[in-house]
Structure formats: structure tokens, C-alpha cells
Image (cartoon, helix red, strand yellow):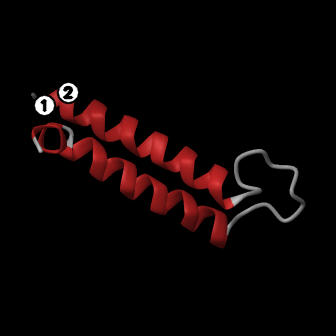
């Protein structure tokens, strides 16, 4: 439980980023299928989760 509390902000960033990545795939996407990130929902969601986690981790470390 301490681990979840310690990384709470990072986990929130991962969830928000994953949802944003899937939304980007769903609404914008790549019609031709040649885009490496946005051609599949899994790729787009994982990339968004990674970026969200990094963004929220950087923000967390900046203010602590």
C-alpha cells in the first residue's frame, strides 16, 4: 500500500495518458495503417501512458 501511495501521482499520469492515447487513436488515428504509433490502439495507449507517467513524474519531482 505504501508503494501505491508513494507513486500515486505517477500512476494517475499513466492512467490519464493511456486514456488520452486511446482517444487520440479513436478520434484521429491513422487511416493508412503505416503510422507506427497511431495505427493500433495498444501502441497508442502504451505511448500515451508512458508520456503521461513521465510528465507527472517530472512534475512531482519538480515541486518536492
Estimate the spatial distance between the alpha carbons at disc 2 and disc 1, rounded to whole Å. 6 Å
Which secondary structure, mark 1?
helix
In the depicted structure, whether residue 3 falls above or below residue 46: above
Which quarter of the rendering shows the C terminus? Answer: top left
Q: What is the crowding at mark 2: few (fewer than 14 residues within 10 Å), some, or many (at least 20)?
A: few
Left or right: 8, with 53 as reference point? left
Identify the residue at horizontal 66%, vertical 60% (top origin).
41
Q: Residue at x 39, y 35 (%)?
A: 54
Q: Dot 2: what SS?
A: helix
Residue 35, placed above or below residue 56: below
Among the 4 quarters of the image, the one containing residue 39: bottom right
- Give the residue at mark 2: 61
Residue sitting at x 38%, y 48%:
14
Residue 59's place in the image compared with 5, above or below, is: above
Residue nearest the observer in this picture, 29 or 8: 8
Residue at position x 54%, y 57% from top? 21
Mark 1 sits on what residue? 63
Relative placement, left or right, of 52 versus 6 is: right
- Residue 11 lies, with reference to residue 42, above or below; the image says above
Q: Are marks 2 and 1 in contact (CB under 8 Å)?
A: yes
Amino acid at each position: 500500500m505504501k508503494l501505491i501511495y508513494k507513486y500515486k501521482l505517477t500512476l494517475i499520469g499513466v492512467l490519464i495518458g493511456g486514456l488520452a492515447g486511446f482517444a487520440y487513436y479513436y478520434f484521429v488515428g491513422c487511416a493508412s495503417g503505416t503510422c507506427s504509433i497511431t495505427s493500433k490502439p495498444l501502441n497508442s495507449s502504451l505511448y500515451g501512458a508512458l508520456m503521461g507517467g513521465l510528465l507527472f513524474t517530472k512534475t512531482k519531482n519538480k515541486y518536492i
